[in-house]
Every structure is written in C-alpha cells, then in structure tokens.
Image (spheres, rainbow, N blue to C red):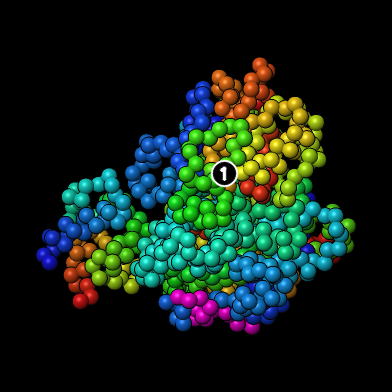
Amino acid sequence: MKIESLMADLKKQIVEALNLRHINPDDIGDDQALFVDGLGLDSIDALELIVLLQQKHNTKIANAQDGPKIFKSVRTMAEYIQANASR
Amino acid sequence: MAIHITGAGVVSSIGHNYEQCFNSLVNGSHGIKPLSRIDSRFAGSLPVGEVAVSNEMMTSQFGLQKVVTRTALLGIHAAAEAVQSAGITGTNWRKGFVSGTTVGGMDRSEFFFPSFLKDREAGDLRDVVHHGCGSVTNVIAEHIGFTDFVTTINTACSSSVNAIIYASKLIKHGIVDIALAGGTDALTRFTINGFKSLMILDEEPCRPFDARRAGLNLGEGAGYLLLVSDKVLEAEGLVSRGIITGFGNTNDAYHQTASSPDGRGSFAAMQEALQAASISPGDVNYINLHGTGTVNNDLSEGRAINRLFNDNVPAISSTKSFTGHTLGACGGIEAVFSLMALERQCVFGNLRFTEPIHETGLSPQREFSARPVNHVMSNSFGFGGNCSSIILSRNMKGQ
Amino acid sequence: MRLYIDAIGTIAPCQLFGDKLEVPEADGNVLKCIEPDYSAWISPQSIRRMSRILKMGTTSALMAIRQASLTEVDAVITGTGYGCIEDTTSFLTKITELEENALNPTPFMQSTHNTIGSLIALLLQCRGYNQTFVHGSHSFEHALLDAMFVLDEQPALKILIGGVDEWTESSHAIHSRFGKYRRPDIDGSMTLVNESRGAVAGEGASFFAIAGRRSSVSKSMIESIKTFIGPIKAHDVSSFLNDTHVDLVLCGFSGNARIDQEIEKLMAAIFPHAAIGRFKHLCGEFTTASAFAVALASRILANSYNDLASIGYQQHGNPIRTILVYNRYFAESHSLILMRAC
C-alpha cells in the first residue's frame, strides 16, 4: 500500500480510536506532532495507538518506551508499519 | 489522643502470618513466581506474588458454609490474625472495620461473565452476589464480629492506607472504640490483563528503584492493624505495639494513571504526614516505599523523597520486591511490615537493586539490617493521583 | 460538626431545579437520568474518554462549583456503590472476546471506583484530600461523615462531596435475576400511594459544595448522620433525634411491598403525627439514592417548591425547617440524615 493511502487510513483510525470527535482526520498534517503540543495526546493515547497498530495493522510494539519515536507523526507511524508489519 | 496499634495480621506470597512474612523479609526470600492459580494465557510465565493457599482450604479452615470471594477469604485470614493477636477481652467496645480493596469480588465475577455474555440467563448468581467492594468487606466483618461500623474505601493502590486513616478518625471522633483497618485484594484475570494493557508489567521479578527497572509484578494478599484509643489500651491492659502518629492524603492532579514528574502529590502527602506527626524529615528512620518498579513511580517518588529529605534520606526499601504489588492491599500489608520494623528494630532489604536511578541517585537498603527505629513512614500512591502516607512511631512512654 | 450545603449539582431522572417537582415516567422498570449537554461543561479533549458515569459525576460537581461561585475546592470526597460499571463491563467483554490479546487500556484505567473523584480533582486541579467510599448503599453517608471529620480539623475548607451510581443494561440484567425489581411490563407511571408493585431501578449523580461555616449562601445544613447495619428500631431513631422535632420525614420507600410495610410500621410508631414524604419514585432505587434525597431535602428546606404533593406531602402551611432522611437499600443498609433549614 502506498504511504499516502496508509497515512489517510491512519488518520481516520486515530480519530476513531482516540475518540477525537472534534477533529477532522483530513486536518491532521502528515508530519504534525501528535503528542505534547500537537494534538495534545498523552501516555494513554500512546498505549491505545499501540493496540491500534496491533489490531488493524498486524504490527507489534513490544516496548512502550519506543512509543514517542514511532508516534511522533502520522508519517513516522506509517513508516514503522511498512517496515515492521508481520506478514 | 493517640491511636495505638495493638494487633496485626498479614497474608502474602511470602508468608501466611506475621512471623512467616517477617522471616522471609529477614532471609531475603521473595514470593515472585510464574502465575499458576489463575486460568490465563499468562499462566506459567508472568511473574506474580500469589498466596500459596487455595480458596477451598481457606473456606474449610474458617468453617465457612458457603464459598465466598478470594478477596474476602484473604481478608478473613489476615483480619482474624490481627484480632487474635490483640487479645481484647472486653465485650462492650464499639468495634469498627474499615477495609480497602480495588477488585472486590471480581475474582468470582470474572468467572460469571463469559457465560453471561453469551446468554443473559446463564452464569451462576453465586459468583456475582459478592461482586461489590462493600459486600466483600461485610463478609469479613461478619466473620470476625466487627460490625458496629463497617465501611470500604477504594482509591486504587492507596486504598488500605486510606482505610487506616479513616479508622483513626473514627476512633478520634468517638464513633468506635476499636477499629480494624487495612485492606485485601486477590489476583484476577481482570487486573492482570489491565496492567498488561498499560504495559507496566515486568516480565521478570521486579527491580524497584533500580536504573534498569522495567515494571511491576502483581501480587495478592491482605494486611490489617487493630487500632485502639488510649482509653481502651488502659482498660484492657494492652501493650501498645506502635502509634499512628501522622498521615497525609493528597491528590497529584496530574494525570489519570501517571505520576507527576516531580512527584508533587507524593511530596505533599509525605510532608503532611510529617507535619501531623510533629517530626522532621531527619527523625524518620525508615521509609517503606511505594516502589512498584515502574519507570514512572520510582522516579517520581524518588524525586519527592530527595526534595523532602534532602541530605537526611533514611534507609529506604520497597518490600514489593518480595510480595509484588498487592494493589488495594499494599498499604495494609506494608503497614504491618512497617510495624515489624518498629517492633523488631530493623529495616528490610530492597531485592534485585544494583544501580541507582540516574536522576535521583538514591540507593535503597539492599539487605535486612538490625538498627534502632523510632519512626517509619509507609507510602502508597495510586491511580487517579491518590497519594497517601502514614507514619508509625514507637510508643516512647514505657510499655 | 455541621455541614453547610452552599450549592448542589444534580443529574437525576427528574428535574430538581425549577419550582415544580414532576414525577418522571419509568421506562419499563428503570428511571434513567435526564442528561445535560455535557459538552457545555467539559472540553472535547477531556470528554473524549469519559464513560457516562464519569460525565455524570464530573458535570454534577462542576454544576455545584458554578452554583457556589467557586473556582477551586480544598477536598473531594465521593461515594459510589458500584463504581464505573460500563468501563468494567467493557474491559471484561474484551478480555473474553479477544482472549486476553491486545486489549485497550482506557476501560481498565477508568474502571477503578476512584476515577470519578480523581477526574474531578484533575479538572479542578484540586491537590487536597481525596477519598472514595465504596460501601454499597452507605457509600454516600460515609463520605458525608468523612467531610465532618475533615471540617472538624479545618473548618474553613470548601469541600465537594458527592454520591454517584450509573445504570447499565448488563448490571440491570444481573440485578433483575436476583428479583430486585418490578416486572418491566407494568406501565411506566408511578403512583405515590401504595406503590407496591416492586422497585424501579434508578441512577444519578449529586454533588454538594460544602462549608464548615454558615454563610449568606448556605442553602441548608446537615446536622447528623448515622448508618446502621441491621434493621433499625424505634429506639435507634429516637436516640439519634434526641428530642429534635421533625417537620418532614423523607422516606426511602422503594416500591417493594414487604420492605415498605416495615418502613411504614416504623414511621407510624415514631412519628404518628409527622408528615411522611417519599423520594424514590423520582430517582429510582440505587446505592447512592440518599445523595439524591439530600439534594431534594436541601431544596425543600430552601423553600424552592410551590407545593410538595409530588412527594406525597400535604402542605400544612408551616414552613419545613427540619427534615429527617431515612433511607434503606432493599432489605439492608439503613441510614438516618438529619437536616435543617438555614
């Protein structure tokens, strides 16, 4: 799957998984910071995103400490999935 | 008015009573082993602190006619020891029971649930009749006959310290003369899976306050103190084993599960306890840490300790390295361990510590050590930012 | 130590505010809350994770704060019988369905009973005393008692105290199997007199801004509280009252004929001439219904209603200055709360 398409899917899934009803998926920038100032997500959201990757993209993250790096932006998430999804 | 401790009872993965637990703490024998009693995909691998007694055995031992929740059984076990050890003979005292718990009867409700999910009429109702936290407390209260005032507190991991705090107030305000206080929690699939989902479980035995700590181990058990007023102490001719001299209850108000980086809630709770006890940080001889072994708690608690104690950090250790994190029961169990430190004049070790956390530089006590102890602080910090701390002190007036 | 109620925030099956009390219509054998637009009270960022009980609890607390014109409080004490059932059920369901694999942490994190009180503290940045009582149908009473202890030490504090419990479909199914409620096919209207077809399940959240000192904003006062484990006798009530004259007894009749008869007999023995009112047809039966009763009693003591026919009280013309709330939860857990007008 092309990364643009994956990123578009991810944006919708993030909004749904984290119940961000006040945010339009299309308004999330590909490289926008998701945590801290960006979308204002927190450590629980990071855990929810780990579950999202496992449930929807067959990609496991064993160590929660790797979260901040992988979830920096939608693009870094997409790149991680493409590199690590189990076949 | 002083709140005297005259009895104590405890059951955990390191012993089924006060003496057994004490001996394990002295010998450095922990109870962390692969999960065995619960039917779970984590059985055989996840390190936990299980109490090595079956429900059937406890039910028969206590002469119970019906099966009750494991949380209640563990509670009865420790509560009965506490009551017996106090040796109160008077029959007219008003007796209160304050118990902390997080799981309540979940150990049985979670059996009911899968059948109920498929069919609303399925599942044995006896598995859910004692689901409520209060219901579990009532079962214990009725068994030990402490029924003049009964209540239950659930503030996550600080539940049983808060129970001890409330019980002290009940005595102080003349609602009861004697109060049994502490807490109980059984291991459940619910909590095991819950903490798994939070990714804060260590796949190995935990390493509280260590630079390479990787999370907590869950545990189960119960611990209670029997508290009395001066009046009861004198009338019964009891020995004051220790005094609850101070306590603090604050809220971190930072995040639903994570502690603030500077441990402001923990700092405030400990400071409040010191002020209530009218002692300074340098007077504390031992801190029984909350010390779960998670990256977040140990850093937060460590920073708070540094800020409060400065150059006067006393001996510190986390006995969760022995028992695992017993959730709602930890405050009660660790209050009993803190009493042991006072009575036996010693401090306990913090297992598997090798290197201090870089940001705090704190080195816990590695091994058991006999030494003079006059004041012990015990910390319990929970989800939802509920931070509580109590101080147990030697009764300096002649015994 | 007296507790002065400065403000109330309530989310209940009936509208407590306004000058009329209307009896709500049950939905089968359930009385569900009239819920506000929560987004008017809680930011989208905070509300997104919240289950219904968390919205109910935090919003009623915020309502009380606003009514009291407070920006902060010094302590938060909460009572809840069953806590966050929806989140608990949701996590249990996932454990079963996903066979302990890749579980979402949010429902677990929010399943602990203290989540309500903690979220309130978080939203208000209240770093003071925080406690949660979970002793079934004495949860709210024990929270009130704790407030008395806290204010006795520090009378100048402002405290938020609340009682919250939610109704869920699955918990209702389980309680129903224990035979607790009237048949759901009975028509929804509830008569006041001789309501004996069985209890109706309810839910609600009531939070109170409490002070230890009387002021110009004090709406009512809680003078004393007592909880009983076994059944209470006339003697228990008279020693509690200590010769205090009571204008109105607000009784927790639940619609269960046998239990309600016991309450009637007891009331007749102690208060042969006093006015007896009832409240559970307004809120339903649940473990923190006494919090609703206190909110209602406070409104009555503040002379808020034109008439009280809807609680079964025939106006005598004399103002109501003292109310005794007598509650029990089915066959267990009796409590007495004595309140006075300010």
A71 shown above or below C331:
below
- Pick whichever, B352 or B320, lies toward us: B320
User: Does the segment drawn in magenta span residue B29?
Assistant: yes
Asked if residue C248 can be seen in this view, the reply is yes
Callout 1 crowding tier (Cα within 10 Å): few <14, some 14–19, many ≥20: many
C171 shown above or below B212:
above
Place residue B239 in its image quadrant: bottom right
Q: Position of residue B96 (x, y in %)?
A: 73, 55
Residue at mark 1: chain: C
Q: Position of residue C274 (x, y in %)?
A: 72, 27
Residue C31 located left or right of residue B7: left
Report the span colored magenta: B25-40
User: Does the segment drawn in magenta span residue C95?
Assistant: no
Residue located at (34% from left, 46% from top): C45
On the image, numbered disc 1 is attached to which residue?
Answer: C199
Q: Position of residue C196 (x, y in %)?
A: 60, 40
C333 shown above or below B212:
above
How many numbered discs sit on the rendered protein? 1
Q: Which secondary structure lies at badge 1?
A: loop
Place residue B80 in its image quadrant: bottom right
* Magenta portion: prevailing SS class: loop
Residue B1 located left or right of residue C219: right
Amino acid type, label 1 = Ala
